[in-house]
Image (cartoon, coloured by chain):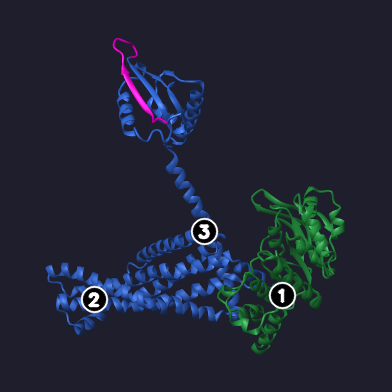
Chain colours: A blue, B green
Amino acid sequence: MIARDAALEVETVENDPVPMRVRASGEWTFSGLKTRRAEILRSIEELRRTAPSRVAWDLTPITDLDDTGALWLLRASRGVSEIEASAQQREILDRVSQASRVRIAMERPIDPYAPAVAIGEAAMRFGVHLRDATALLGRLVLEALALARRPRDTPFRELSAGVFRAGVAALPVTMLVGFLVGIVLTYLSALQLKRYGADLLVINIVGVGVVRELGPMLASIIAAGRSGSAMTAQLGVMRVTEEIEALQVMGVSVITRLVLPKVIALAIALPLVTFCTDLAALAGAMLVSRYTLGIAPEAFLEALPRAVETINFWIGIGKSAAFGFAVAFVACHYGLRVLPNTDSLASGVTRSVVAAITIVIILDAIFAILLRNVG
Amino acid sequence: MSADPGEYAITIDGLVNAVGPGQILHKDLNLQVRRDEVMTLVGGSGSGKTQLLRVILGLKRPVSGTVRVFGVSWEDPSFKKVRDARRRMGMLFQNGALFSALTVFDNVAFPLRERGGVSEKKIRAIVHAKLSEVELAPHHGTLLPASLSGGMVKRVALARALALAPDLVILDEPTAGLDPDRSERFVQLIQRLRADHRFAMLMVTHDLDTLFALTDRVAVLGDRHIIACGTLDEVRELPHPFVQSFFGGDRGRRALAHGGAAA
């Protein structure tokens, strides 16, 4: 038999209650529909503009029908009651019709309660995290107290390695970011202050802003992305490879050996990194002040202590220690929850960074409220 | 009836174990592993062998029942008793679970350093001795786990498990991931080490060759408890569908012909 492409003929019969007579012929299959695809689509479009009650279909000349052809015919003849087809063709059309109905049923109607359900589920997940994080904090405190009674068991090596990795190794990138932010902040402030002849106030704004807020915040955010993700990944991989179970079987406390050193290390390292970030940001500020406002570096350095009270510096350092603890704690919390598969590891690291940054910002807001009358 | 904890390495009485709320995995499970025997735990997929092992290792708390290793429960309030019981136990994980950031030497030395009170010179001597027992040379000590073959990982993990000269060694699928030749050599290594050190052994394995070569008694886990526990000949008589399919058939007959009873 010679293969024939699918074809659609539309005949209009005058003075007939069903004037449009559609005749489908040829092979209504995936390959058969290729050649005259555009033409058939145009005809179907025109037919759609006619009321279904005025259209009759004759499918009997079709020589071959597959699911693709059946789908096209069902869509083209939607609502039409007069369809002449063979028993075999009806069977295929019914089957495809059922399948397409199921598909339509899966397009769920908009659930008006969906936002409330989503909020509820998120709240439940948050509740579970809060419970587990509280338990981890409790264990951390108990282990720290136990360690205070056995100081010889303090994991000094892990602690110093943590301070090096989170502190020294992070300095280049953090100081660079601090330097650039100092430049940008000073430049933008200078533009505005010049209008009012209050050029020298740039030292106050940038000085207090960097030392009290931006320095700790920048250092913490970079620490969350750099150190926090590394901590989560390390613990997550150790969970996947059963190294954590191996430690537990040997009676080694995972909290003392893995979590405590990280938390203490970042709480020590971050204030030091913040100090260096502050210096870099102020160096950037000094550079811009020199060339935009004509403030000599010596004048900048002389005015700085008067503009920025020492208490602001200590507030910034204190906040950094709290942020460091928070970032490491969140990283360890997510790391210990990683399941033994790569998806869980990837999503755990991502969530750890996002959660750490969010918590740092929330803590910063809390500190801002609590210390609003200080400095 | 509770067993006398004095003669048993592991005693489990009336264990009820769950994997989630309302999802009971084991109920009224009793098991004893003597101080001088090799016990193999077998069971179908989903019978909870791994979860039972986690309870025995103290990694998971059961719903109820008692688990004692050398007479000490993991819930014992005495930190020293629990620590000492752990030091009498060595574990070989299925994938080795070597500490990836430490060298082979530091991995084997780890339990010794944790124990404390052992000079670095003595640690060096013990580690080299352990590596030699598992047929590894001292120079392998400088390698990192990532550069080891599967067989070497198992050997180093075994050396680490034996570092403190334990009285009980637990092996989770000791020959998993090894080709037949290496598998046989590893089983022979375990036989030699056991003959030298006489530790009790609890093993989880699907490999019949390993089972027939090493085991004194078999415990079959099914229907949420131990459905059979005894010598190979005793257990193979049990008309339970799992037992018949596990030990019967061509696989079982070949393994029986090859391995025979354990020494």
Q: Position of residue B55 (x, y in %)?
A: 70, 61
Mark 1 sits on what residue?
A: B87
Q: Is residue A350 left or right of residue B123?
A: left
Picture layout, residue B221 above or below residue A53: below
Q: Are marks 1 and 3 in contact (CB under 8 Å)?
A: no
Alpha carbon separation for disc pair 1 and 2: 59 Å
Residue density around tag 2, few if under 14, some if 14–19, many if 20 or more, within 10 Å: many
Query: In this orientation, which residue lies closer to the viewer: A2 or B154?
Result: A2
Chain letter, disc 2 residue: A
Looking at the rendered image, the disc whose residue lies closer to the viewer, 1 or 3, is 3
Picture layout, residue A129 above or below residue B139: above
Amino acid under disc 3: Ser
Mark 2 sits on what residue?
A: A285
Alpha carbon separation for disc pair 1 and 3: 33 Å
Picture layout, residue A110 above or below residue B95: above
Q: Are marks 1 and 2 in contact (CB under 8 Å)?
A: no
Q: Which residues are magenta?
A: A3-18
State whether discs 2 and 3 lie on one chain.
yes
Of helix, strand and loop, which mostly describes the magenta segment?
loop
Looking at the rendered image, the disc whose residue lies closer to the viewer, 1 or 2, is 1
**B40 part of magenta stretch:** no
Where is residue B33, by image quadrant?
bottom right
Residue density around tag 1, few if under 14, some if 14–19, many if 20 or more, within 10 Å: many
Lower sequence index among marks 2 and 3? 2
Amino acid under disc 1: Arg
What residue is at 16 percent from the left and 67 percent from the top? A192
Alpha carbon separation for disc pair 2 and 3: 43 Å
Chain letter, disc 3 residue: A
Mark 3 sits on what residue?
A: A344
Q: Is residue A216 left or right of residue A342?
A: left
